[in-house]
Structures are given as C-alpha cells and as structure tokens.
Amino acid sequence: MLWLCLYFPLLPLQVFTRSEQTERPTLASEQGLVVCTNTVAAKSGIRPGQSLTTAMALDGRLHVLSRDISKEVAALNQLSRWCYQFSPMVSLKSPHILLLEIEGSLRLFKGLGSLLKRITHGLEAQGFIGQRGLGYTPKAAELFARSALKQTPTDIKSSLLIQELREISIALLDIPGKQITLLQEMGLTTLGQVLDLPHAAIGKRFGVEFLRYLQQIMGKHPDPQLPISLEPRFHSELFYIEGIQNKQGLLFPIKRLLTELCDYLRTRQLDCQGFEWCFAEIKGKTRLLQLAFSQPQNSFSVFLELTRIKLESLPLGTAVHSVLLTSKTLIAANPAPFSLWDGLQYSSTQSPELLLDKLSARLGKDALHGIACRQEHIPELAWQPLPCTQTQPVSAPLPTVTKLRPLWLLPQPAPVQQRQEKLYWQGQLTLLRGPERIDSHWWQSPRIQRDYFVARHEQGGLYWLFRDLATRRWFVHGLFY
C-alpha cells in the first residue's frame, strides 16, 4: 500500500495566521519558549526552543501568540475530514500528522501527480502549508514528511524509496530522546546504519518496542492505523492579529469559511440545516449569529445572502479578531430529480423556502411561524403555531371540514348588539345559514355551548356569528374573504 503523510509543523502558528499574510515577525510560544515562527522571524535568527527573552532581544517588532492546543486539535480534525474526499482510510496522529492510504485512489484521481496537486492546492486555499511524504508503510511516509525531502511521483519505486529511507537522519525517528542520544554516541547517524546492526543486539540493548518500531518502518511488522470517525459536523475558524474594524471587512472571512463549508458538504454529500457564526472581539466579548433553514441547503449564495441579512442587525463593539463557523446539523443530501428541460426554464420568483429563510433572518426566528391543526372542536383552539424551520409533519391530521369556515378569526369574539330582534355590528347583519352547534369542554366550567351562523353585512361582507347558549348573547367570531 502507498501511504501519504501530511505533516504540519507550523500548525500552532497557522491556526492564528492562515487567514492573512503579515510582514511582521510572529511566533507561537508555550511556557516561555518558542514553539514555531514565521519566515520573517526565522530570518532574524529566532528558532524553536529559544526563550521568549532571547527572541525579543533578537527582534523588538516580534508579535507573540500563546499556543492554543484546542485550536490545533479542532483544525487537524477538520483537515482530516476534508482529506476523506481523497481516501477512505484517513488516520490522525496528534499533534500535527495526517496519514492517508492512497493506493486505491490513484486511478480515480488520474494518477499520483494529479492527486498530490489537488491536495496541495486545497490545503493552500485553506491557508495550511505543510510537508508531505510518500512511503509504503505509514511510519516510512511519516519519516519522509518530517525530513522535508522533495519527492516526485516518479520517485515511488520501492528500491528507490528504501535507499532514501536508509539515508534519513536518526534525529527524525519517533523514539525517546535518550535513545537518539545513545545511538549518536555509538557513532550512528542514519537509519540505514541502525538497520544494519544485528536485530537481536538491538532488541537487547534498546528494547522490544524499539525493534518493533524499526520493523514497522520497513513493513516487516503490522502497523494498523485507526481511521477517523466521520461525525457529520463542521468547525473552522479564522484569526486576525490586527482585528477587523467593520462589518464590510467581515465579509471576506465569511465568504472564505462558507466556501470551506460548501466544499465539505459537496465532498461528503451532505446538506446543512443550519449553522452558527461566532465573532470574538479583541476585548473578549463574543457575539453569536444563528441561522436555521426551512429545508436543508448546500448553496453558497443562499448561505451568504442569509448571513448578510442577519449580520445587519448585529451590533459590533471593538475590532473582531476571530471568526468561527460551526454546524452540527448536517444530514445526508437528498438531491431533487433533475429534468433535461430545467436549463430552458426561467422564473423570476424565488422559492417559498428561501423567502421564509430571508424573513426569519431579518425579523428573527420567533417573528415568523406557520399554522398547524389541533384536535379541538373549539375554533380558537383548533390551531397551533408551527416554527417555519420545522420539516417534520405535525402529529394531528388535517380534519375533514364539512361546514363552511371563515379564513380569518378575530383575536377575540366581538359583541353584537341586538335591537328589536335585529343584529348590529358596524351595521346591520342578516342571518343566511345556521345554526351549527358546537358543544365541548363539558368537563370544565364554564361549559362551551355555541350556535354558529353565517350572516351578511349591509355592505355585503360575510361574517361568522355565534350565540352563546349560556348567556344568550351574540358575537362575531370570523370574517369570510
């Protein structure tokens, strides 16, 4: 099997700087020591392992970022799920390594060169730059990636890879530092020199684990890899050192993160039912924007338009230094049937679902709702509000209506005056149909007993009236349109 290792030694820094290019020397630090630096800082002589005091003395313009392991874990997990489009076997090795078994993917992607190009360009588009290695075992691929050896698609012949593997420095071996020091004291500098030693002597002096590690590098001992779990979720964040001062400036990171989300949905054949934006300000305040869709979506233009509408109502204080997009409401895509004539049709109207999403984004999720039926005889109790984002049918079936019902009910029944056996409500009413008796809620007090009628107003309108049998009073309850 052919393995590809993606190694991100600058990940502690890239989780902060992948969104922007800066000419300022920048580094990530942990416990007062330099973890990694950008190119500008490296030119000033700043190296990993130095103290911050030394680094500041070498360059007074230095920008120091505190290492955030949680951000690194989140970024590596997201990259591993992104890599799943290239191989069904993706393994994550913390803190900065991804392993892909790509032997079975070469034909699909039209060769190794095309596959490597797509992976490299995809990583660069997301702002992640790493080192890659090819090998016929996972640990061999990892060693090549750590060595930063420039490998081409023509360099994967077994004999050539073994020769290059033997020349790798023992300082790159994934073994305790004490063992590396001991090997160096023995005058050994390359992996090939270690492999030439008698295996029995190696096992006796360095232990069984060390011997097994060498055998796994050379493919003489099983080295099973644990594949990633493919939970349907998305998490990606962009960090801005200088901060973003206004909403217009936020559109660039918003578009970039939405592009990542849509690429992820497309490659995983998923749809999104909603997502959440998190804008972290420099002074520590966090502002959230939540979007839920009336039906699952995977359209960049829809995501961007609804985010823009929602963003209009978001108050911003200080500059925003972090933009985070998350979604845990991802489901398997169910594409609609495609017609050959779809491209010839034109419609200037938008879908009802998109209109509902726009209204909900602008007015708020609580300002818009649908209507569903309830199992009730009393007219004002026979319906219930339904969230527009609810896609499941309501439990109550639609009742069979055999009587004439108005389209509009008044918020409260309006009293009707009765003079000389004639009814008046903003003019005289004449009964046309009825009565229809509704008798319910006998178990509570007062019991509801009504006789309903259809009446015509003197100006021609049709109203729905009822007479309360307990009080003998008349009320207007609805209007026919």
Image (tube, helix red, strand yellow):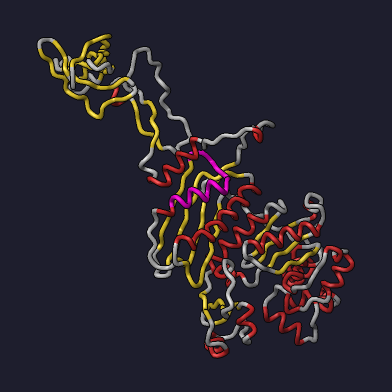
Front position in the image: 468 or 355: 355
* Quadrant into which the C terminus falls: top left
Front position in the image: 161 or 213: 161
- Magenta segment: does it hold 300? yes
Q: Is residue 46 above or below residue 449?
A: below
- Judged left or right of residue 83, residue 67 is left
Residue 351 coordinates in the image, percent (x, y): 52, 36
Q: Quadrant of residue 270?
A: top right
Tell me if residue 364 can be seen.
yes
Q: Residue at x 39, y 19 (%)?
A: 399
Q: Residue furthest left?
A: 420
Residue 362 coordinates in the image, percent (x, y): 41, 46
* Quadrant into which the N terminus falls: bottom right
Residue 143 coordinates in the image, percent (x, y): 75, 70
Q: Quadrant of residue 435?
A: top left
Residue 206 coordinates in the image, percent (x, y): 74, 77
Q: Is residue 127 above or below residue 427?
A: below
Q: Residue at x 78, y 57 (%)?
A: 114
Q: Main secondary structure of the magenta part?
A: helix
Q: Residue furthest right?
A: 159
The part of the chain drawn in magenta is 294-310
Tell me if residue 220 can be seen.
no
- Judged left or right of residue 149, residue 122 is left
Number of marks: 0
Q: Residue at x 18, y 19 (%)?
A: 427
Front position in the image: 226 or 376: 376
Front position in the image: 244 or 78: 244
- Magenta segment: does it hold 16? no
Q: Quadrant of residue 298?
A: top right
